[in-house]
Protein backbone atom coordinates (compact mmCIF):
# COMPACT_ATOMS: atom_id res chain seq x y z
CA UNK A 1 0.00 0.00 0.00
CA UNK A 2 1.36 3.42 -0.86
CA UNK A 3 -1.08 5.75 0.90
CA UNK A 4 0.68 8.78 2.46
CA UNK A 5 -1.28 8.18 5.69
CA UNK A 6 0.52 4.89 6.21
CA UNK A 7 3.88 4.66 7.95
CA UNK A 8 6.33 1.79 8.27
CA UNK A 9 8.57 3.71 10.71
CA UNK A 10 9.76 1.21 13.34
CA UNK A 11 9.36 3.57 16.33
CA UNK A 12 5.77 4.32 15.36
CA UNK A 13 5.01 0.62 14.87
CA UNK A 14 6.58 -0.19 18.22
CA UNK A 15 4.60 2.58 19.95
CA UNK A 16 1.35 0.70 19.19
CA UNK A 17 2.65 -2.80 19.90
CA UNK A 18 1.53 -3.17 23.53
CA UNK A 19 -1.74 -3.07 25.46
CA UNK A 20 -2.47 -4.14 29.05
CA UNK A 21 -2.21 -7.87 28.26
CA UNK A 22 1.58 -8.03 28.59
CA UNK A 23 1.88 -9.19 24.96
CA UNK A 24 3.84 -7.38 22.27
CA UNK A 25 2.84 -7.58 18.57
CA UNK A 26 4.43 -5.18 16.10
CA UNK A 27 2.24 -4.33 13.07
CA UNK A 28 3.66 -4.08 9.54
CA UNK A 29 2.26 -0.56 9.15
CA UNK A 30 0.36 2.09 11.10
CA UNK A 31 -2.25 4.54 9.83
CA UNK A 32 -3.94 7.40 11.70
CA UNK A 33 -6.77 8.74 9.52
CA UNK A 34 -8.17 12.17 10.53
CA UNK A 35 -11.48 11.94 8.69
CA UNK A 36 -14.08 9.47 7.53
CA UNK A 37 -12.99 9.97 3.91
CA UNK A 38 -9.38 9.10 4.76
CA UNK A 39 -10.49 6.03 6.67
CA UNK A 40 -12.66 4.77 3.82
CA UNK A 41 -9.79 5.27 1.38
CA UNK A 42 -7.52 3.20 3.65
CA UNK A 43 -10.10 0.39 3.84
CA UNK A 44 -10.57 0.49 0.08
CA UNK A 45 -6.83 0.04 -0.50
CA UNK A 46 -6.52 -2.63 2.22
CA UNK A 47 -9.31 -4.66 0.61
CA UNK A 48 -7.72 -4.27 -2.80
CA UNK A 49 -4.34 -5.47 -1.47
CA UNK A 50 -5.87 -8.01 0.96
CA UNK A 51 -4.07 -6.29 3.86
CA UNK A 52 -5.33 -7.27 7.33
CA UNK A 53 -6.61 -4.27 9.38
CA UNK A 54 -6.86 -4.06 13.16
CA UNK A 55 -8.61 -1.05 14.69
CA UNK A 56 -7.21 0.53 17.84
CA UNK A 57 -8.51 3.19 20.20
CA UNK A 58 -6.79 3.82 23.54
CA UNK A 59 -5.12 0.36 23.49
CA UNK A 60 -6.17 -0.37 27.06
CA UNK A 61 -7.41 -3.84 26.04
CA UNK A 62 -6.30 -6.56 28.45
CA UNK A 63 -6.59 -9.32 25.83
CA UNK A 64 -4.26 -8.17 22.99
CA UNK A 65 -7.43 -7.30 21.01
CA UNK A 66 -5.95 -3.99 19.83
CA UNK A 67 -2.61 -5.51 18.78
CA UNK A 68 -1.52 -7.22 15.60
CA UNK A 69 1.58 -8.45 13.85
CA UNK A 70 -0.31 -8.93 10.60
CA UNK A 71 -0.89 -5.95 8.33
CA UNK A 72 -2.07 -2.50 9.37
CA UNK A 73 -2.83 -1.08 12.81
CA UNK A 74 -5.57 1.49 12.18
CA UNK A 75 -5.62 4.06 14.99
CA UNK A 76 -8.99 5.82 15.40
CA UNK A 77 -7.72 8.34 17.96
CA UNK A 78 -7.79 11.28 15.51
CA UNK A 79 -11.46 10.77 14.59
CA UNK A 80 -13.16 12.23 17.65
CA UNK A 81 -15.60 15.05 18.15
CA UNK A 82 -18.81 15.61 20.10
CA UNK A 83 -21.21 16.22 17.23
CA UNK A 84 -24.53 16.83 18.88
CA UNK A 85 -25.97 16.90 22.40
CA UNK A 86 -29.72 16.54 21.93
CA UNK A 87 -31.57 17.62 25.08
CA UNK A 88 -34.96 16.58 23.73
CA UNK A 89 -34.02 12.99 22.95
CA UNK A 90 -31.39 12.82 25.74
CA UNK A 91 -28.62 11.61 23.50
CA UNK A 92 -25.20 12.56 22.21
CA UNK A 93 -23.41 11.67 18.95
CA UNK A 94 -19.64 11.21 19.18
CA UNK A 95 -16.68 10.14 17.07
CA UNK A 96 -14.93 6.85 17.94
CA UNK A 97 -11.64 8.40 19.09
CA UNK A 98 -13.23 10.51 21.85
CA UNK A 99 -11.86 9.53 25.28
CA UNK A 100 -14.62 8.44 27.65
CA UNK A 101 -13.53 10.28 30.82
CA UNK A 102 -13.19 13.77 29.27
CA UNK A 103 -16.44 13.19 27.32
CA UNK A 104 -18.25 12.37 30.55
CA UNK A 105 -16.95 15.57 32.18
CA UNK A 106 -18.07 17.68 29.21
CA UNK A 107 -21.55 16.14 29.44
CA UNK A 108 -21.67 16.48 33.24
CA UNK A 109 -20.98 20.22 32.89
CA UNK A 110 -24.24 20.37 30.90
CA UNK A 111 -26.16 18.33 33.50
CA UNK A 112 -25.93 14.89 31.86
CA UNK A 113 -24.70 11.54 33.06
CA UNK A 114 -23.12 9.18 30.54
CA UNK A 115 -23.35 6.14 32.79
CA UNK A 116 -20.75 3.55 31.59
CA UNK A 117 -17.72 3.73 33.92
CA UNK A 118 -14.89 1.33 33.06
CA UNK A 119 -11.93 1.88 35.39
CA UNK A 120 -9.91 2.73 32.27
CA UNK A 121 -12.26 5.59 31.29
CA UNK A 122 -9.52 8.27 31.25
CA UNK A 123 -7.57 6.31 28.62
CA UNK A 124 -10.14 4.37 26.61
CA UNK A 125 -12.07 5.59 23.58
CA UNK A 126 -15.77 5.41 22.81
CA UNK A 127 -15.04 3.16 19.81
CA UNK A 128 -12.96 0.75 21.90
CA UNK A 129 -15.44 0.73 24.78
CA UNK A 130 -18.30 -0.13 22.40
CA UNK A 131 -16.23 -2.71 20.52
CA UNK A 132 -15.54 -4.43 23.89
CA UNK A 133 -19.01 -3.80 25.39
CA UNK A 134 -17.23 -2.21 28.35
CA UNK A 135 -18.84 -2.01 31.76
CA UNK A 136 -17.78 -0.92 35.22
CA UNK A 137 -18.71 -0.74 38.87
CA UNK A 138 -21.93 1.20 38.23
CA UNK A 139 -23.11 -1.27 35.62
CA UNK A 140 -24.91 -2.87 38.55
CA UNK A 141 -27.52 -0.14 38.20
CA UNK A 142 -27.02 1.17 34.68
CA UNK A 143 -25.90 -1.90 32.68
CA UNK A 144 -22.93 -2.28 30.30
CA UNK A 145 -22.35 0.22 27.48
CA UNK A 146 -24.49 -1.93 25.14
CA UNK A 147 -27.67 -0.64 26.79
CA UNK A 148 -26.53 2.99 26.23
CA UNK A 149 -25.83 2.66 22.49
CA UNK A 150 -28.83 3.86 20.49
CA UNK A 151 -27.23 3.88 17.08
CA UNK A 152 -23.95 3.33 15.27
CA UNK A 153 -22.37 4.39 12.01
CA UNK A 154 -20.11 1.57 10.90
CA UNK A 155 -17.74 1.12 7.94
CA UNK A 156 -17.55 -2.41 6.58
CA UNK A 157 -14.37 -3.77 5.02
CA UNK A 158 -15.86 -3.36 1.53
CA UNK A 159 -16.29 0.38 2.13
CA UNK A 160 -20.07 0.29 2.70
CA UNK A 161 -21.15 2.64 5.50
CA UNK A 162 -24.11 1.40 7.56
CA UNK A 163 -26.28 3.80 9.57
CA UNK A 164 -27.76 1.55 12.26
CA UNK A 165 -30.41 2.44 14.82
CA UNK A 166 -32.14 0.35 17.43
CA UNK A 167 -35.61 -0.67 16.19
CA UNK A 168 -38.43 1.02 18.08
CA UNK A 169 -41.00 -1.66 17.22
CA UNK A 170 -43.03 -2.97 20.11
CA UNK A 171 -44.10 -6.04 18.13
CA UNK A 172 -42.24 -7.83 15.36
CA UNK A 173 -42.57 -11.36 14.01
CA UNK A 174 -40.38 -11.01 10.94
CA UNK A 175 -37.52 -13.48 10.70
CA UNK A 176 -34.90 -14.61 13.18
CA UNK A 177 -34.41 -12.46 16.28
CA UNK A 178 -30.57 -12.27 16.04
CA UNK A 179 -30.90 -10.12 12.90
CA UNK A 180 -33.56 -7.77 14.26
CA UNK A 181 -31.12 -5.30 15.77
CA UNK A 182 -27.81 -4.97 13.94
CA UNK A 183 -26.44 -2.49 16.50
CA UNK A 184 -25.97 -5.49 18.77
CA UNK A 185 -23.80 -7.25 16.20
CA UNK A 186 -21.17 -4.55 16.47
CA UNK A 187 -21.26 -3.91 20.23
CA UNK A 188 -18.70 -6.35 21.67
CA UNK A 189 -17.45 -7.45 18.22
CA UNK A 190 -13.85 -6.42 19.10
CA UNK A 191 -13.16 -4.87 15.71
CA UNK A 192 -13.89 -8.10 13.80
CA UNK A 193 -17.00 -7.00 11.86
CA UNK A 194 -16.57 -3.31 11.03
CA UNK A 195 -15.06 0.00 12.09
CA UNK A 196 -17.22 2.20 14.33
CA UNK A 197 -17.26 5.71 12.86
CA UNK A 198 -19.83 7.36 15.12
CA UNK A 199 -22.01 6.39 18.08
CA UNK A 200 -25.27 7.79 19.39
CA UNK A 201 -25.38 7.30 23.17
CA UNK A 202 -28.17 7.70 25.72
CA UNK A 203 -27.86 10.32 28.46
CA UNK A 204 -29.40 10.39 31.92
CA UNK A 205 -29.95 13.42 34.15
CA UNK A 206 -27.08 13.83 36.62
CA UNK A 207 -28.10 12.63 40.10
CA UNK A 208 -28.59 15.45 42.63
CA UNK A 209 -26.49 13.62 45.20
CA UNK A 210 -24.07 10.68 45.39
CA UNK A 211 -22.89 9.07 48.63
CA UNK A 212 -20.22 6.36 48.93
CA UNK A 213 -19.94 3.94 51.85
CA UNK A 214 -17.14 1.49 52.58
CA UNK A 215 -18.04 -1.32 54.93
CA UNK A 216 -15.35 -3.65 56.34
CA UNK A 217 -16.26 -7.19 57.44
CA UNK A 218 -14.45 -9.67 59.70
CA UNK A 219 -14.87 -12.50 57.17
CA UNK A 220 -15.26 -12.81 53.42
CA UNK A 221 -18.35 -14.98 53.90
CA UNK A 222 -20.07 -12.16 55.83
CA UNK A 223 -19.20 -9.64 53.12
CA UNK A 224 -20.54 -11.84 50.31
CA UNK A 225 -23.76 -12.62 52.22
CA UNK A 226 -24.17 -8.85 52.69
CA UNK A 227 -23.86 -8.33 48.91
CA UNK A 228 -26.73 -10.75 48.22
CA UNK A 229 -28.92 -9.11 50.87
CA UNK A 230 -28.13 -5.57 49.60
CA UNK A 231 -28.82 -6.53 45.99
CA UNK A 232 -32.14 -8.12 46.88
CA UNK A 233 -33.28 -5.34 49.23
CA UNK A 234 -36.40 -3.46 48.17
CA UNK A 235 -35.13 -0.12 49.56
CA UNK A 236 -31.33 0.12 49.19
CA UNK A 237 -30.94 0.49 45.38
CA UNK A 238 -27.09 0.49 45.27
CA UNK A 239 -25.47 1.69 42.06
CA UNK A 240 -22.42 -0.47 42.76
CA UNK A 241 -21.41 -3.23 45.15
CA UNK A 242 -17.64 -3.59 44.95
CA UNK A 243 -15.69 -6.24 46.83
CA UNK A 244 -12.09 -6.32 48.13
CA UNK A 245 -10.69 -9.53 49.64
CA UNK A 246 -8.00 -9.51 52.37
CA UNK A 247 -5.13 -9.15 49.85
CA UNK A 248 -6.85 -6.33 47.98
CA UNK A 249 -7.69 -4.60 51.26
CA UNK A 250 -4.00 -4.72 52.27
CA UNK A 251 -3.18 -2.81 49.07
CA UNK A 252 -6.09 -0.39 49.51
CA UNK A 253 -4.99 0.46 53.08
CA UNK A 254 -1.68 1.77 51.75
CA UNK A 255 -3.58 4.34 49.65
CA UNK A 256 -5.50 5.88 52.59
CA UNK A 257 -4.18 8.34 55.16
CA UNK A 258 -5.03 6.24 58.21
CA UNK A 259 -2.89 3.05 58.29
CA UNK A 260 -4.78 1.74 61.35
CA UNK A 261 -8.05 1.67 59.43
CA UNK A 262 -9.96 -1.65 59.32
CA UNK A 263 -6.93 -3.72 60.34
CA UNK A 264 -9.08 -6.60 61.63
CA UNK A 265 -11.13 -6.77 58.42
CA UNK A 266 -10.79 -9.68 56.00
CA UNK A 267 -12.99 -8.12 53.31
CA UNK A 268 -14.57 -4.80 52.35
CA UNK A 269 -17.65 -3.78 50.38
CA UNK A 270 -17.83 -0.36 48.73
CA UNK A 271 -21.22 0.87 47.62
CA UNK A 272 -22.60 4.08 46.12
CA UNK A 273 -26.07 5.51 46.44
CA UNK A 274 -27.41 8.19 44.14
CA UNK A 275 -30.72 10.01 43.84
CA UNK A 276 -32.68 13.08 42.86
CA UNK A 277 -33.66 16.08 45.05
CA UNK A 278 -36.83 14.25 46.06
CA UNK A 279 -34.98 11.13 47.30
CA UNK A 280 -33.61 10.67 50.82
CA UNK A 281 -30.41 8.59 51.03
CA UNK A 282 -31.42 5.42 52.96
CA UNK A 283 -28.31 5.55 55.18
CA UNK A 284 -29.98 4.05 58.27
CA UNK A 285 -31.20 1.06 56.25
CA UNK A 286 -27.65 0.49 54.94
CA UNK A 287 -26.14 0.62 58.42
CA UNK A 288 -28.82 -1.69 59.78
CA UNK A 289 -28.14 -4.29 57.08
CA UNK A 290 -24.37 -3.97 57.58
CA UNK A 291 -24.72 -4.56 61.32
CA UNK A 292 -26.97 -7.56 60.70
CA UNK A 293 -24.00 -9.03 58.78
CA UNK A 294 -21.44 -8.37 61.53
CA UNK A 295 -19.79 -5.39 59.79
CA UNK A 296 -16.98 -3.68 61.72
CA UNK A 297 -19.03 -0.60 62.58
CA UNK A 298 -16.18 1.56 63.94
CA UNK A 299 -14.47 1.39 60.54
CA UNK A 300 -17.47 2.11 58.28
CA UNK A 301 -16.78 5.27 56.26
CA UNK A 302 -19.19 7.53 54.43
CA UNK A 303 -17.95 9.68 51.50
CA UNK A 304 -19.85 12.80 50.43
CA UNK A 305 -18.78 15.43 47.91
CA UNK A 306 -16.56 15.32 44.83
CA UNK A 307 -13.19 15.10 46.62
CA UNK A 308 -14.22 12.42 49.12
CA UNK A 309 -15.78 10.28 46.38
CA UNK A 310 -12.64 10.61 44.29
CA UNK A 311 -10.60 9.36 47.28
CA UNK A 312 -12.99 6.43 47.71
CA UNK A 313 -12.55 5.42 44.08
CA UNK A 314 -8.77 5.73 44.41
CA UNK A 315 -8.93 3.19 47.22
CA UNK A 316 -10.46 0.61 44.87
CA UNK A 317 -8.40 1.59 41.81
CA UNK A 318 -5.14 1.28 43.78
CA UNK A 319 -5.51 -2.51 43.62
CA UNK A 320 -5.10 -3.22 39.86
CA UNK A 321 -2.48 -0.46 39.53
CA UNK A 322 -0.39 -1.97 42.36
CA UNK A 323 -0.72 -5.49 40.97
CA UNK A 324 0.40 -4.20 37.58
CA UNK A 325 3.50 -2.65 39.20
CA UNK A 326 4.25 -5.81 41.19
CA UNK A 327 4.20 -7.89 38.01
CA UNK A 328 6.44 -5.57 35.95
CA UNK A 329 9.84 -6.94 37.13
CA UNK A 330 8.88 -10.48 35.99
CA UNK A 331 8.40 -9.56 32.31
CA UNK A 332 12.04 -10.34 31.59
CA UNK A 333 11.56 -13.95 32.76
CA UNK A 334 8.31 -14.51 30.85
CA UNK A 335 6.03 -13.67 33.78
CA UNK A 336 3.19 -11.15 33.94
CA UNK A 337 -0.04 -10.21 35.73
CA UNK A 338 -2.98 -12.43 34.87
CA UNK A 339 -6.36 -10.84 35.50
CA UNK A 340 -9.46 -13.00 35.26
CA UNK A 341 -12.74 -11.62 34.05
CA UNK A 342 -15.22 -14.44 34.69
CA UNK A 343 -18.64 -13.88 36.25
CA UNK A 344 -21.36 -16.06 37.74
CA UNK A 345 -24.94 -15.30 38.79
CA UNK A 346 -24.31 -13.17 41.90
CA UNK A 347 -25.72 -15.72 44.36
CA UNK A 348 -23.00 -18.20 43.30
CA UNK A 349 -20.01 -15.92 43.77
CA UNK A 350 -18.85 -17.51 47.07
CA UNK A 351 -19.03 -21.00 45.47
CA UNK A 352 -17.02 -19.87 42.43
CA UNK A 353 -14.34 -18.22 44.60
CA UNK A 354 -14.08 -21.39 46.73
CA UNK A 355 -13.67 -23.50 43.54
CA UNK A 356 -10.96 -21.15 42.31
CA UNK A 357 -9.06 -21.32 45.60
CA UNK A 358 -9.12 -25.12 45.47
CA UNK A 359 -7.76 -25.10 41.89
CA UNK A 360 -4.97 -22.72 42.93
CA UNK A 361 -4.12 -24.68 46.08
CA UNK A 362 -3.92 -27.98 44.18
CA UNK A 363 -1.12 -26.49 42.07
CA UNK A 364 0.78 -25.02 45.03
CA UNK A 365 0.34 -21.46 43.71
CA UNK A 366 -0.09 -18.24 45.69
CA UNK A 367 -3.76 -17.25 45.97
CA UNK A 368 -4.71 -14.30 43.75
CA UNK A 369 -5.71 -10.85 44.96
CA UNK A 370 -9.47 -10.65 44.33
CA UNK A 371 -11.59 -7.53 43.95
CA UNK A 372 -14.37 -6.15 41.78
CA UNK A 373 -18.00 -6.16 40.94
CA UNK A 374 -19.49 -8.59 43.47
CA UNK A 375 -22.97 -7.20 42.90
CA UNK A 376 -22.81 -8.63 39.37
CA UNK A 377 -21.08 -11.85 40.52
CA UNK A 378 -18.05 -10.52 38.67
CA UNK A 379 -14.71 -10.41 40.52
CA UNK A 380 -11.27 -9.80 39.05
CA UNK A 381 -8.66 -12.23 40.31
CA UNK A 382 -5.11 -10.95 39.84
CA UNK A 383 -2.27 -13.47 39.80
CA UNK A 384 1.40 -12.70 39.35
CA UNK A 385 3.41 -15.21 37.33
CA UNK A 386 7.12 -14.86 38.02
CA UNK A 387 8.20 -16.84 34.95
CA UNK A 388 6.76 -18.69 31.99
CA UNK A 389 6.47 -22.02 33.86
CA UNK A 390 4.40 -20.37 36.60
CA UNK A 391 2.34 -18.61 33.93
CA UNK A 392 1.41 -22.00 32.53
CA UNK A 393 0.38 -23.39 35.95
CA UNK A 394 -1.71 -20.30 36.68
CA UNK A 395 -3.37 -20.56 33.26
CA UNK A 396 -4.15 -24.18 34.05
CA UNK A 397 -5.71 -23.22 37.41
CA UNK A 398 -7.77 -20.51 35.71
CA UNK A 399 -8.95 -23.07 33.13
CA UNK A 400 -10.14 -25.37 35.90
CA UNK A 401 -11.94 -22.47 37.62
CA UNK A 402 -13.63 -21.54 34.35
CA UNK A 403 -15.08 -25.02 34.02
CA UNK A 404 -16.65 -24.56 37.48
CA UNK A 405 -17.79 -21.04 36.52
CA UNK A 406 -19.59 -22.42 33.45
CA UNK A 407 -21.16 -25.19 35.55
CA UNK A 408 -22.50 -22.46 37.87
CA UNK A 409 -24.15 -20.70 34.89
CA UNK A 410 -21.38 -18.13 34.42
CA UNK A 411 -19.28 -16.62 31.64
CA UNK A 412 -15.53 -16.82 30.91
CA UNK A 413 -15.36 -13.07 30.13
CA UNK A 414 -17.80 -10.52 31.54
CA UNK A 415 -16.27 -7.21 30.49
CA UNK A 416 -12.82 -7.34 28.86
CA UNK A 417 -13.80 -9.50 25.89
CA UNK A 418 -11.99 -12.45 24.36
CA UNK A 419 -9.33 -10.82 22.20
CA UNK A 420 -6.44 -13.07 21.33
CA UNK A 421 -5.56 -14.50 24.71
CA UNK A 422 -8.94 -15.90 25.78
CA UNK A 423 -10.12 -17.54 22.54
CA UNK A 424 -9.03 -20.91 23.91
CA UNK A 425 -11.86 -20.63 26.49
CA UNK A 426 -14.60 -19.87 23.97
CA UNK A 427 -15.59 -23.51 23.28
CA UNK A 428 -16.25 -23.97 27.01
CA UNK A 429 -19.09 -21.50 26.84
CA UNK A 430 -20.33 -21.62 23.26
CA UNK A 431 -21.53 -24.65 21.37
CA UNK A 432 -20.25 -25.58 17.91
CA UNK A 433 -23.47 -24.21 16.42
CA UNK A 434 -23.05 -20.85 18.17
CA UNK A 435 -19.45 -20.57 16.98
CA UNK A 436 -20.44 -21.56 13.45
CA UNK A 437 -23.11 -18.83 13.45
CA UNK A 438 -20.56 -16.25 14.57
CA UNK A 439 -18.22 -17.40 11.78
CA UNK A 440 -21.08 -17.10 9.27
CA UNK A 441 -21.76 -13.49 10.34
CA UNK A 442 -18.05 -12.69 10.17
CA UNK A 443 -17.81 -14.25 6.70
CA UNK A 444 -20.86 -12.32 5.45
CA UNK A 445 -19.44 -8.95 6.57
CA UNK A 446 -15.72 -9.59 6.06
CA UNK A 447 -15.40 -12.45 3.53
CA UNK A 448 -11.61 -12.17 3.22
CA UNK A 449 -11.13 -12.21 7.00
CA UNK A 450 -9.15 -8.99 7.05
CA UNK A 451 -10.56 -7.29 10.15
CA UNK A 452 -8.96 -7.88 13.57
CA UNK A 453 -7.48 -11.24 12.66
CA UNK A 454 -7.07 -13.51 15.67
CA UNK A 455 -9.69 -11.79 17.83
CA UNK A 456 -12.53 -13.89 19.30
CA UNK A 457 -12.74 -16.76 16.77
C1 LIG B 1 -6.34 -0.33 34.06
C2 LIG B 1 -7.46 -0.90 33.21
C3 LIG B 1 -8.74 -0.94 33.72
C4 LIG B 1 -9.77 -1.46 32.95
N1 LIG B 1 -11.02 -1.46 33.47
C5 LIG B 1 -12.04 -1.91 32.75
C6 LIG B 1 -13.36 -1.88 33.29
O1 LIG B 1 -13.59 -1.45 34.41
N2 LIG B 1 -14.35 -2.33 32.50
C7 LIG B 1 -14.13 -2.80 31.24
O2 LIG B 1 -15.10 -3.17 30.57
N3 LIG B 1 -12.90 -2.83 30.71
C8 LIG B 1 -11.86 -2.39 31.42
N4 LIG B 1 -10.60 -2.43 30.89
C9 LIG B 1 -10.40 -3.00 29.56
C10 LIG B 1 -10.42 -1.92 28.42
O3 LIG B 1 -9.97 -0.75 28.89
C11 LIG B 1 -11.79 -1.61 27.94
O4 LIG B 1 -12.33 -2.73 27.36
C12 LIG B 1 -11.85 -0.41 26.95
O5 LIG B 1 -13.15 -0.21 26.68
C13 LIG B 1 -11.07 -0.55 25.65
O6 LIG B 1 -11.08 0.73 24.98
P1 LIG B 1 -9.85 1.23 24.11
O7 LIG B 1 -10.20 2.52 23.46
O8 LIG B 1 -8.63 1.23 24.91
O9 LIG B 1 -9.82 0.10 23.00
P2 LIG B 1 -8.58 -0.67 22.42
O10 LIG B 1 -7.88 -1.38 23.51
O11 LIG B 1 -7.79 0.20 21.55
O12 LIG B 1 -9.33 -1.73 21.50
C14 LIG B 1 -10.16 -2.69 22.09
C15 LIG B 1 -10.91 -3.45 20.97
O13 LIG B 1 -11.78 -2.54 20.29
C16 LIG B 1 -11.50 -2.53 18.90
N5 LIG B 1 -11.74 -1.16 18.46
C17 LIG B 1 -11.19 -0.02 18.93
N6 LIG B 1 -11.73 1.05 18.31
C18 LIG B 1 -12.62 0.57 17.40
C19 LIG B 1 -13.49 1.17 16.45
N7 LIG B 1 -13.58 2.49 16.31
N8 LIG B 1 -14.25 0.35 15.69
C20 LIG B 1 -14.19 -0.99 15.82
N9 LIG B 1 -13.41 -1.61 16.71
C21 LIG B 1 -12.63 -0.84 17.50
C22 LIG B 1 -10.08 -2.99 18.76
O14 LIG B 1 -9.85 -3.60 17.51
C23 LIG B 1 -10.00 -4.02 19.89
O15 LIG B 1 -10.55 -5.23 19.46
C24 LIG B 1 -9.53 -1.95 31.64
C25 LIG B 1 -8.24 -1.90 31.13
C26 LIG B 1 -7.20 -1.38 31.90
C27 LIG B 1 -5.83 -1.35 31.34
Image (cartoon, rainbow, N blue to C red):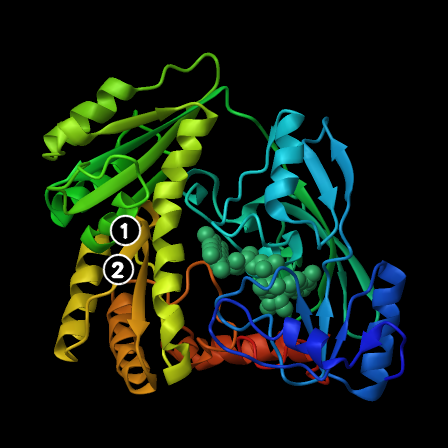
Which residue is tagged 1? 251
Dot in front, 1 or 2: 1
Check the image and report above or below for 150 versus 411. above
The residue labelled by disc 2 is 369
Q: Nearer the viewer, residue 84 or 364?
A: 364
What residue is at 67 percent from the left and 31 percent from the top?
90
Q: Position of residue 77 (x, y in %)?
A: 72, 58
List x then y, in percent, for residue 19.
Answer: 54, 68
- Mark 1 → mark 2, Cα distance in angstroms: 9 Å
Q: Nearer the viewer, residue 38 or 428?
A: 38
* Mark linked to residue 168: none
Q: Quadrant of residue 101?
A: top right
Q: Is residue 388 left or right of residue 61?
A: left
Say if 440 sits above or below 301 in the image. Answer: below
Q: Find out whether the residues at labels 1 and 2 contact each other: C-beta distance under 8 Å.
A: yes
Residue 261 in picture, x, y percent from top left: 19, 36
Amino acid sequence: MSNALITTDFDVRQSVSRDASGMELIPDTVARPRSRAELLQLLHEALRDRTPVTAAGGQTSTTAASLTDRGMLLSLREIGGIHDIDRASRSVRVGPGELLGPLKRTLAAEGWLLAPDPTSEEDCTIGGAIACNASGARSLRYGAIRSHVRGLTVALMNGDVLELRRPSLEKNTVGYAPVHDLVDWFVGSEGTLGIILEAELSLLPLPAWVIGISIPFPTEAAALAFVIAARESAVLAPRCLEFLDAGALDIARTSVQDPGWATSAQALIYTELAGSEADEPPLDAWLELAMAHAALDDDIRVYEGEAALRDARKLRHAVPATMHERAAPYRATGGRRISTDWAVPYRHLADALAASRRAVERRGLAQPVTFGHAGNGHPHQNFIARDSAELERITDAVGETLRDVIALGGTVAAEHGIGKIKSRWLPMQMSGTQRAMMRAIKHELDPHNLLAQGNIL
